[in-house]
Image (cartoon, rainbow, N blue to C red):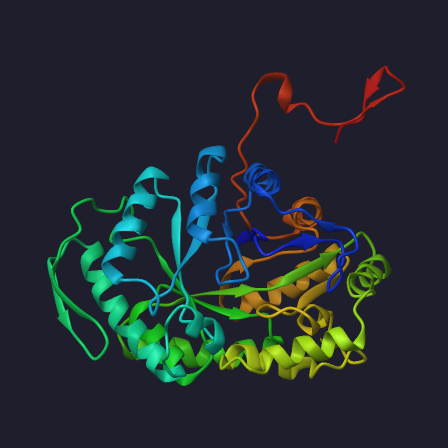
Amino acid sequence: MRLFWFIPTQGDGRYLGTTHLMRQTDHGYLKQIAQAVDQLGFEGVLLPTGNSCEDAWVIASTLVPVTKRLKFLVAVRPAVMSPTLSARMAATFDRFSEGRLLINVVTGGDPEEAKGDGIFLSHDERYEVTDEFLTVWRRCMTGEATSFKGKHIHIENAKLIYPPLQKPYPPLYFGGSSKPAIDLAARHVDLYLTWGEPPALVGEKIKVVREKAERAGRNMRFGIRMHVIVRETKEAAWNAANDLIKYVDEDTIERSQRALAKLDSEGQRRMVSLHKGDRSHLEISPNLWAGVGLVRGGAGTALVGDPDTVAKGLLEYADLGIDTFILSGYPHLEESYRVAELLFPLLPIDTDAPESEGSARLAGEVVGNEFRVVK
């Protein structure tokens, strides 16, 4: 199992849907999170993309020098970016980070945001663009002089002079639940991502994607994006989940759901269908809670419980074929420590946490100013 964390460039705090105890997510704070998860042993971090977030490429570039091992999952936006410019950006980042780049292919699901970027394409047309984009991008990244003339993209004799460090290129991650999205994944990407739906639904989706990839002669890995709320007891965990939305009123839920309904993302539609905006039925599967999705787009579910319960839930997804888990929790700095301390010992992972040198490796509290409590 590979465990990733999340860099909350769109905001962070102890509660959702309120300004109460809202946290300033400036560079200093995001650096704290990145350095914490790097030291704790998470393999990488996802940086979100879109007009509600700080720019992922710029933020990731500022965090590379202050971390040692951490990998950065950063988005390319095919309808917004040129495939050749994107290839140059990715290759440069990959070399200068010494191979710590992962690529998140984001087709986009918000028509209004797309119009703001000058993109006036239908849902299926955006996937046509993405297909052409990845065809050009993959050829360029392998050093091939590339010419291409498609319905949306026309490239003549493109060359990537400075290649990426990772071969043939940084791994491609991608998520999408519609038929065009799954067809695209089968042709191009290395790891297919899903949001945290109940295990039965995730299993069905994995089966479809795996079969299509195999028919295309490709092997596919799988990952999941979800939240976790883990505490030492089940009662404390469920109290924390309920506290997270205790300032969310019905008007905020209605406004949020109305905004999410405008999206043409099939994955987002599936997320909303899990709770239908009803806060009275949020445990949609044993220990799987949909409260986050009342007011936040994207990943809207969380595994809730004591360490054994949450670990069991993650292992259930692992048994379905998931090997990469992109987790998060509010606030992201403190929750990264909870996950590392409470869950890492229960999961089959190699955290590869860097070891400190000399006396810095000592752990445990000094009691009575005289002796140290150690494991």
Q: Residue furthest right?
A: 368
* Residue 265 seen in this snapshot: yes
Quadrant for the C terminus in the image: top right
Residue visible at 60% across and 64% down in the picture: 226
Q: Nearer the viewer, residue 130 or 311?
A: 130
Count of numbered badges drawn on the protein: 0
Q: Quadrant of residue 295?
A: bottom right
Give the vertical position of 119 relative to 356 (above or below).
below
Q: Position of residue 15 (x, y in %)?
A: 76, 58
Q: Quadrant of residue 99?
A: top left
Q: Position of residue 191 (x, y in %)?
A: 40, 64
* Residue 285 seen in this snapshot: no
Q: Nearer the viewer, residue 299 or 371?
A: 299
Q: Position of residue 78 (x, y in %)?
A: 33, 67
Q: Quadrant of residue 235?
A: bottom right
Residue visible at 49% across and 68% down in the picture: 321
Q: Position of residue 72 (x, y in %)?
A: 45, 49
Left or right, residue 226 beside residue 58: right
Left or right, residue 4 beside residue 127: right
Give the vertical position of 42 relative to 204 (above or below).
above
Left or right, residue 99 beside residue 336: left
Q: Nearer the viewer, residue 196 or 311?
A: 196
Residue visible at 54% across and 76% down in the picture: 202
